[in-house]
Amino acid sequence: MKKTPSRKSIAGLLLSAIMSFGCSAEEQHNSTSENESPIYQLPQSPISKCINVGNALDAPNEGDWTYRIEDYHLKAIADAGFDTVRVPIRWSAHALATAPYTIDPVFFDRVEHVVNTGLDYGLQVIVDVHHYDGIMQSPDEHYERLDQMWRQIAKRFSGRGDRIIFEVLNEAHTELTNSKLAKLNSKVLTTIRNNAGSEPWIILGGDEWGNLSGIEDARFPDDPRTILTFHDYSPFPFTHQGATFTVEKYPLGREWGSEKEKKELKALFEDAQKIGKKWNKPLFMGEFGVIDGVPNSWRAEYIEQYRRKAEEAGIGWCLWDFGASFAIYDVSTREWEPKILDALMSQ
Ligand code: BGC
């Protein structure tokens, strides 16, 4: 897990500022007031309020990173008012390395149990491919394996309607750049459509670790049931303070909320709207959040501002995470952190 802030993010913000100035009156047709989003009405996202049950099935083995998904977690998520749960999954650690790349049946059963439990509690469930490190380093060598894993996954969940949503690949980076992703996204999309037996929504992302800048200059297949995703943890020194897994280490005690930071937040969603309009697709902020250990009042303030801006922009959001290192639910007491739940759900 090595993350660095996007190299393109500063350029993206500048571009956003330039584009905002350059907008014609017609382009601003949905604008509310001078200081508010949204500018554009984006296609409706099927996902509104979502949370990641991260660090469980995306660890090398579930439990390795302490958190395990329990059925009651999914009930708590549905009861709290979320409509969707994103389940990050490290399929690559549970499939043969050579053709036919068979997925371990025990692992497959475990994933299916989690998916079925989420559906039973009334949630939509996002099944992704997470932490596929090999494909980031050597895309050409892993391309066929990813596609064949998706053939099995789509088949397994086929004919189940559109409450299971498939996300082709989490956070492309390093060698997996947008030119390679264009081919990969289009191939896997066809594989899912050919095997899932229904018209599920499919989530596609860009390079640059899934940052917004990654979907700006990506190329996407022309498919009306696709959603574009981006992640945002800016500013990293605030959201990842004290994290042991980042390349750069950020000291504790960093606050968020200066005028400059609020402007950057506004610019982020203006930029996102323009990119959503360019592609004419629903947008989904599939990860955002603040690490546990930061005072909850600080976390709540940041999280509320981000999710409100996302909602104003017509963009679905998914908090990272439920019960692990960015947790907002205490699995030992079985209680939500009330300030943060309120920050997510208040009107
Ligand atoms: C990674 C997690 C990490 C989180 C926050 C996710 O994409 O999968 O392991 O904790 O980002 O950095």
Image (cartoon, grey):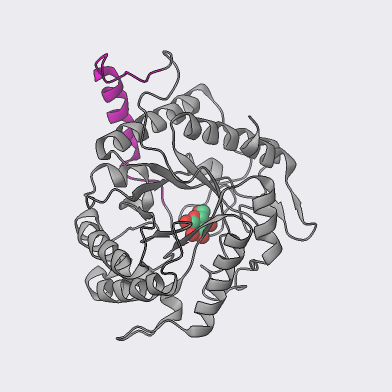
Closer-to-camera residue (11/311)? 311
Please tell me in which quadrant of the rendered image residue 128 appears: bottom left
* Quarter of the figure that contains the C terminus: top right
Q: Which of 177 and 31 is in front in this view?
A: 31
Left or right: 13 as drawn, with respect to 87: left
Q: Which of 86 and 12 is in front in this view?
A: 86
Image location (x, y in percent) of residue 213: 31, 42
Q: Is residue 21 above or below residue 178?
A: above
Q: Residue at x 31, y 51 (%)?
A: 206
Residue 283: where, in percent of width, then height? 39, 42
Point out residue 101 in the picture as x, y percentages from the top left corner. Answer: 35, 83
Quarter of the image for residue 92 reads bottom left
- Asked if 29 appears above or below 109 in the picture, the reply is above
Residue 26 in magenta? yes
Regarding residue 301, the answer to whether it shows in the image is yes
- Which residue is located at x 26 percent, y 68 percent? 139
x%, y% of residue 191?
28, 68
Query: Left or right: 141 with respect to 33?
Result: left
State the residue at coordinates (60%, 49%). Answer: 291
Q: Give the range drawn in magenta.
A: 4-31
Which residue corresponds to the image point at 41% horizontal and 32% vertical from the top-left? Answer: 269
Count of labels in the image:
0
Looking at the image, residue 96 sits to the left or right of residue 49; the answer is: left
The quarter holding residue 154 reads bottom left
Whether 121 is among the magenta residues is no
